[in-house]
Amino acid sequence: MSESKDFLRTIVEEDLKSGKYKEVITRFPPEPNGFPHIGHAKSICINFGIAKDYNGHCNLRMDDTNPTKEDTKYVEALKDAVQWLGFDWGKNVYFTSDYFSKIYDYAIKLIKMNKAYVDSLTEEEIREYRGTITQGGKRSIYANRSIEENLDLLERMKNGEFKDGEHVLRAKIDMSAANMKMRDPLLYRIRHAHHFRTADDWCIYPMYDFAHCLSDYIEGVSHSICTLEFENNRDIYDWLLDTLELKLPRPYQHEFARLGINYTVMSKRKLLELVDGKYVNGWDDPRMPTIAGYKRRGYTKESILNFCDQIGIAKANSMVDVAQLEFCIRDDLNQKVPRVLCVLDPLKVTIENYEGNEEIDAPYYPHDVPKDGSRKLPFSKNIYIERDDFMENPPKGYFRLTPTQPVRLRHGYIISCKEVVKDANGNIIEIIAQYYPESKSGADTSGIKVSSAIQWVCAKEAKTVEVRLYDRLFKNEAPEGLEDLNPDSLKIIKNAIIEPAVIIDRIDERFQFERQGYFYADPIDYTNEKPVFNKIVGLKDSWAKKTKKETAPKIIDKPQVQKVQVVGEIEALNEEQQALFDKYTKKLQLNNEVSNILARDKDLSNFYKDALAVINSPVTLANIVVNEVARELKQTEISKVKFTPIQIAELVKMVDDEVISSKIAKEVFEDMAKAGINPSKIVEDKGLVQISDPIIISPIIDDIIAKNPDNVEKFRAGNTKLLGFFVGQVLKTTGGKANPTVVNELVALKLK
């Protein structure tokens, strides 16, 4: 658990320290009237996370008090979401309906205390009598009924003798209360409806405010954690528990800010409208903000958990940029998934001077990703390229294939265009090309200069796949309803082609289609006969650029084109920049993206050069310079920054020497940027030295293993992905100080 605690954990610790509770028990109490969405994910992480951090327990409880909207399918969706996110509710799932008899008994007790009465006003009259914010309400004439009459009416309501809305049970509190929720709130209403669990046993159902606090009390909940919308309900929560004189310990309610994300709606009513109106293909449509939707789209649980951790727990509502969620999935997949080639809009290319067939060895991962693996790319006379990777009459700044400009095939040879073949309507249907035998990637002696590499697929071995390109469901940042739907939220490409290595034998596979984005084998529709891939997210946040384009003045007769240097959307390098790029990639072994950034930015390249003169660690140093240093230079002139290349070199040395981790290095850099203090002093003052001693780490691992017997059993049964869970828990417990390499080795050893 991090040393920096949110306000909820601070409350929990104070309650434990004072002896208010012996055990922390939280609960996640959703209504089973829809699929859980990303906002529920935040609540799940908070409630289950706090319980786990303090060796407590979190109950999963279905708030099933409205039989007209609830269904078993929603219960299963909620259970699946909690399990998929990696949390465990124990042996039982609880239901408010389990306590209907006890709750009814509490209602009788309130009547006998003259603290509740059966009201016969209409719904409109109740609303009218309640008053306004500035004017007190007026109590119903039916509040004067005797205790005996109220008991009789409540029993008859329970027995089904009255119609819906004919009577309600209300608490007798204060019709002039400043908090309007306290103006004799409703406790029970009549509902002649079949309940999915209790069938037709009940004709009256408790209101949320009545059932919620009592369910918490019955289950022994210590901390009832709700979103801010229930802040005013807390007075009812406390009044009911206090008035009923329930013995201590009793639960208390605490509120946190609910999750709001731009371009997203999280109202269950609006989500249901989308599903029922068939504007989407069900609750698990990959465009929906439901956990099932994110899961089917290809989001990982790690990305969702990381997002919830990043946004934190606040006391005031705010709007989170959806780009932050998209960053989390990119960040997670970048180090995990293989890179492969896919062509979405194929254009045939015939290489007239190539005969035979060969296989090109191509790595799945770039060299800066700590994973191995490669595949054989079939290559032959006929290939397909992306249609927009060729232009017959290109504008200035177009760096892909043209009649006069050669291009490299990714991992393969350089080709040039010899002839353009068109149909009767003037549409390009084929490119006749030639290749240069000495230009093979990794062994190029041709001397031919090219500015771009494009993806391609061998026509002979190509596999046809369906690709579903998902975009944001709403076009407006603050959507209100159906009128804000994005008409381009789904584009289906039926005849995309892909390299044969991507055809898989099992579901739950993700890939990066180079220059296209991250994709996921659809867990429902994918078959080897009909492969279907969902776009998870693009390689970059293209939405901001898209919206800027829509609002910018249109330039007539000037086509917008992608400008590609190696792989990416960038301008051509000048001679000096190209020399730096070649040095970085070939001599220093930096990846293309990092090299490109350094080569183009004179300040960054000079800073990097000066730091490199102090420490010979080109890769680690480059990563810090193009990320942390570059971000600081966007805000401050280089002459005014408070840190020096020598200090950055010192920081890198501590990372290389495993004195601190890469994660801690970012924290140290923030302090350096603010005050210009030497990194070694920051590390010493804050006690940030990385823990590498197995004697210190082993007991922490043992404790985590002891607390997670179910996951240990699953790991030993073959679910090796859980190794990451245990490593993550150790790193979390040590505040990121534990040496990841040592932790990995020790965890793997102890789980054998």
Image (cartoon, rainbow, N blue to C red):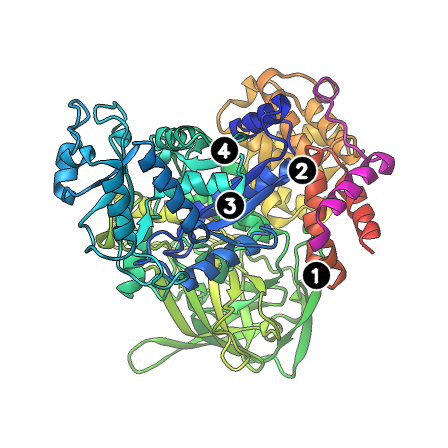
Residue visible at 81% across and 42% down? 742
What is the three-letter code of the residue carrying label 2?
Answer: Lys
Magenta-colored span: 682-711
Mark 1 to mark 3 CA distance (whole Å): 23 Å
**What secondary structure prevails in the magenta region?**
helix
Percent position of residue 131, x then y: 15, 29
Residue visible at 35% across and 41% down? 107
> Residue 697 in magenta?
yes
Q: Label 3, on which residue? A: 44
Looking at the rendered structure, which numbered label has been put on residue 719?
1
Residue visible at 29% across and 32% down? 114
Mark 4 to mark 3 CA distance (whole Å): 19 Å
Q: Residues within 10 Å of mark 1 (few under 14, many from 20)?
A: few
Question: Which of the two labelled residues, at mark 1 and mark 3, occupies the earlier sequence position?
Answer: 3
Mark 2 to mark 4 CA distance (whole Å): 28 Å
Question: Which of the two labelled residues, at mark 2 and mark 1, occupies the earlier sequence position?
Answer: 1
Q: Label 4, on which residue? A: 251
Dot 3: element:
helix
What is the three-letter code of the residue carrying label 4?
Answer: Pro
What is the three-letter code of the residue carrying label 3?
Answer: Ile
- Judged by depth in the image, the label closer to the viewer, 3 or 2, is 3
Q: Label 2, on which residue? A: 732
Q: For this view, does 206 lie left or right of residue 21?
A: left
Between 46 and 511, the residue placed more toward the observer is 46
Question: Which of the two labelled residues, at mark 4 and mark 1, occupies the earlier sequence position?
Answer: 4
